[in-house]
Image (spheres, rainbow, N blue to C red):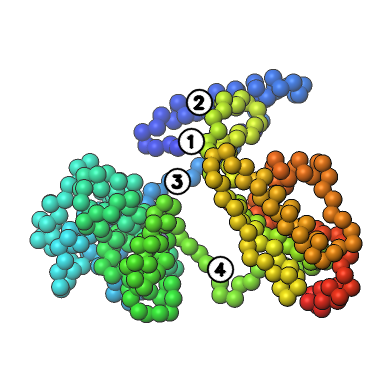
Amino acid sequence: MKLLIKTSAPSTDVNELYNNAGDKIKESMASFQMRGSNWRFVAVQKLDINTVQYKPLKGSSYIPRPKYLADKKAIINLKNEDNQCFKWCWARALNPVEKNSQRATEELRKQAEALNGNGITFPVTLKEIDKFERNNTDLSVNVFGYEKGFVYPLRISKHERKHAVDLLLISNDSINHYCLINNLSRLLSGQVSNNQKSRLFCRRCLNSFRSNEALDKHKRYCNVHAAVWLKMPKPGTKLTFKNHNRSLRVPFIVYADFESFIKPIHTCQPDPNTSYNKQHQKHTPSSFCYYIKCFNDDVYEHEPVSGVAQGDDDDVAGKFVETLEAHIKQIYRQFKFPKRMTFTKATKKGTREQPNVIFVMGSLVVIVLEITVTLREDLKEQHTMAAT
Ligand SMILES: [Zn+2]
């Protein structure tokens, strides 16, 4: 009847959880009966309870590196027997040594005391790293995961601080363990290309760049997005169009694109007991650009046409329709189509106030103008030749 998702931690009162779930079911049944379907509740015949154990990611004690990572020679795997690999990694990052850097020595333990670990419990979860960054205001932590030869971002810091440390969380069946990455470029090389030359990586998306300038330019855009693992299609993968019988051959196609300001719409909270659509943003067009493509560039070619709003009240959509209409009429006159293009009242109204366009994933708009006309005989010949 209803899916209830609840989290049960060791401190949760199970009776309370059960009572709340029971109340919720009774409430749902009452509201169902009130809808006037004439169905009557008689009995609960079956109750399914599905549970799953929640295992938060947290790093604890030493486990050997997978061979792929060992061969890379880009990480330091601290050999600790306690749950504090996170702390030892940090101490090693701030106090590098030439030899035996994987040993959690007495000296390293003393060096770790310089870190502020207030309120941190070991093993450290990804969530607790926020607290660690708040305690240590000149440190920032990035954590990467590893799976079948691929390294990917798990937790990328929001801060750019004096000391930034990259950790790799590796795991076997029962234990997760933080390792210190001492050469990110070497660790990731080969994952993105066969080029073994040292490259600079964006930690959020693992794209690589040759120069600091290129990386900085990329980061300006990438930093506003969440860290992601980009999985590209396999080499040679193709998207193909099969339904050629459903395609329409046209002499001209208009490709158009709008840019818009997005303004929030303030509305009342709708009734949560009924299905509703909530409008929360209004797209106000601020500029447009369109390009008219002929089936043959030798027959007709024109530069892209664009328009930008000069003020808040500028009707960019209207201007777009007017410009495009004039352009289409000019093409019509140029090729002397024997049949006149007619804009009905309804079409004009629809196109001027709210253009009949299809928005595809953002603001890309493709308009296919269906010009059902008879081409001049010579033009028709070229059309047929170009299409075969
Ligand atoms: Zn990036």
* Ligand 1 contact, mark 2 (Cβ < 8 Å): no
| Image point (53%, 42%), residue name | 311
* Percent x, y of residue 50: 54, 41
Give 326 or 248, whichever is nearer the viewer: 326
Quadrant showing the N terminus: top right
Q: Quadrant of ligand 1?
A: bottom left
Of marks 3 and 1, the one in the foreground: 1
Residue 143: which disc?
Answer: none
Distance from the alpha carbon under mark 2 to that under mark 3: 21 Å
Kind of residue sitting beneath label 3: Gln
Distance from the alpha carbon under mark 2 to that under mark 1: 10 Å
Q: Residue 48: which quarter of the image?
A: top right
Q: Are marks 3 and 1 in contact (CB under 8 Å)?
A: no
Kind of residue sitting beneath label 4: Pro
> Is 56 above or below relative to 253?
above
Mark 1 secondary-structure assignment = loop
Local packing at callout 3 (Cα closer than 10 Å; few below 14, some 14-19, many 20+) is few
| Image point (35%, 62%), residue name | 216
Q: From the image, tell me which residue sits under label 4.
A: 233
Q: Residue 228: which quarter of the image?
A: bottom left
Please tell me which of labels 3 and 1 falls first in the chain. 1
* Percent x, y of residue 8: 43, 36
Please tell me which of labels 4 and 3 falls first in the chain. 3
Of marks 4 and 3, the one in the foreground: 4
| Image point (76%, 73%), residue name | 299
Of marks 4 and 2, the one in the foreground: 4
